[in-house]
C-alpha cells in the first residue's frame, strides 16, 4: 500500500525559547504530530521548520508531499514570499494543506483565502473548550463522539474574518460563552484545505487522542486531492479579432 507522504511544518520558536512550552513539547510541536502520524499504517511523516534553508520547504520536499501541515504563531512575517508562492502553487496543483491554530494568520492561509485579516476575538485564560461535531458523517469526524472536550485552551471567538467555508465540520464553545467556527474545509484549485482551531502552545493539546484523531482523519481527507500539473497565474490576453 502506498503511504500518504506528509510534511509537518512548524516555526519551532516557542519550544526553544519558552520553558513552559519546552516542557510540554520537548522535541517541538512538529515532532509530537509527526510521531503520532507515523504510528498510522498508511502515513509517512517528516518535518520542516522555519529556520532551515528555504524554511525546509524546497521544491524537492514539496514535490514529495501529499499533505502539508502548518503551525505558525510568532513569526508569520519571517516566511519568505517566494516559499509562500511555491506552497500556494502546490496546493492549487492538488497538495493537501492543514492549517492549525494561529496559522489562520499565516501568509499561506491568507494567500489561499484571499484575505489578510483573519480577525477574531481571543482570550488566553485556559478555559474549557467543547468542540461540537456538526457533520458526524464527514470523513474528518470519523470515530468521534458528539464533541471533543479540551480541559484548558486559549479562547477564539466570532466574528472570525474568513471566507465562508465550503463545509463546516466543528463549532467550538468556550466557558466564557463564545463560539467559533473551528473546523473549516475549503477547495482551492485541485487542493483540499482544512483549518483546525485547537493547538495553543502552552497547553498539551497535541497529546490529546481525539485531537490527533482529527488530524489523521483530515490528512486522509486532504490527500484525496488529485495532483495535477497546472500553472495558475496570469492569463494571456486574447489576440484581437480582425
Image: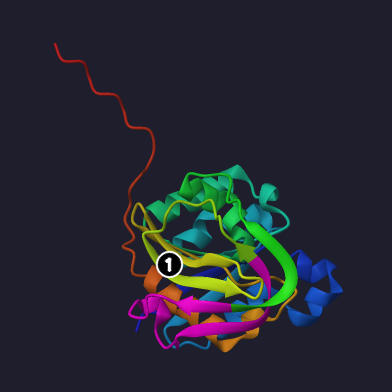
Q: Secondary structure at mark 1?
A: loop
| Relative depth, front residue between 242 and 71 | 71
Q: Residues within 10 Å of mark 1 (few under 14, many from 20)?
A: many
| Relative depth, front residue between 92 and 47 | 92
Q: Quadrant of residue 81?
A: top right
Q: From the image, which quarter does the C terminus lie in?
A: top left
Q: From the image, which quarter does the N terminus lie in?
A: bottom left
The outermost residue toward the top is 242
Q: Residue at x 41, y 75 (%)?
A: 134
The image shows residue 194 at horizontal and vertical percentages of 46, 65
The outermost residue toward the left is 242
The image shows residue 42 at horizontal and vertical percentages of 42, 84
Q: Residue at x 36, y 78 (%)?
A: 139
Q: Is residue 37 visible?
A: no
The image shows residue 111 at horizontal and vertical percentages of 51, 46
The image shows residue 127 at horizontal and vertical percentages of 70, 76
Query: Which residue position holds label 1?
Result: 66
Q: Which residues are magenta?
A: 130-155
Residue 210 lies left or right of residue 92; in this view the side is: right
Q: Is residue 160 visible?
A: yes
Q: Residue at x 38, y 58 (%)?
A: 191
Q: Residue at x 33, y 56 (%)?
A: 190
The outermost residue toward the front is 177
| Relative depth, front residue between 219 and 7 | 219
Q: Is residue 148 magenta?
A: yes
Q: Is residue 142 magenta?
A: yes
The count of marks equals 1
Amino acid at each position: 500500500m502506498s503511504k500518504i507522504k506528509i510534511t509537518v511544518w512548524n516555526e519551532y520558536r516557542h519550544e526553544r525559547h519558552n520553558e513552559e512550552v519546552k516542557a510540554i513539547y520537548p522535541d517541538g510541536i512538529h515532532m509530537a504530530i509527526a510521531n503520532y502520524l507515523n504510528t498510522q499504517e498508511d502515513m509517512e511523516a517528516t518535518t520542516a521548520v522555519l529556520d532551515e534553508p528555504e524554511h525546509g520547504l524546497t521544491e524537492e520536499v514539496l514535490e514529495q508531499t501529499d499533505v502539508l501541515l502548518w503551525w505558525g504563531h510568532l513569526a508569520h512575517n519571517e516566511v519568505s514570499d517566494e516559499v509562500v508562492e511555491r506552497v500556494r502553487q502546490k496546493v492549487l496543483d492538488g497538495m493537501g494543506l492543514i492549517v492549525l491554530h494561529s496559522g489562520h494568520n499565516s501568509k499561506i492561509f491568507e494567500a489561499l483565502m484571499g484575505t489578510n485579516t483573519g480577525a477574531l476575538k481571543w482570550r488566553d485564560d485556559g478555559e474549557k473548550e467543547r468542540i461540537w461535531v456538526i457533520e458526524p458523517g464527514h470523513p474528518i469526524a470519523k470515530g468521534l463522539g458528539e464533541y471533543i472536550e479540551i480541559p484548558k485552551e486559549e479562547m477564539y471567538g466570532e466574528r472570525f474574518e474568513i471566507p465562508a467555508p465550503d463545509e463546516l465540520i466543528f463549532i467550538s464553545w468556550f466557558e466564557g460563552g463564545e463560539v467559533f467556527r473551528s473546523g473549516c474545509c475549503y477547495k482551492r484549485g485541485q487542493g483540499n484545505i482544512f483549518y483546525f482551531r485547537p493547538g495553543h502552545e502552552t497547553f498539551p493539546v497535541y497529546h490529546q487522542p481525539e485531537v490527533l484523531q482529527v488530524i489523521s482523519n483530515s490528512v486522509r481527507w486532504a490527500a484525496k486531492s488529485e495532483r495535477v500539473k497546472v500553472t495558475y497565474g496570469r492569463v494571456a490576453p486574447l489576440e484581437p479579432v480582425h
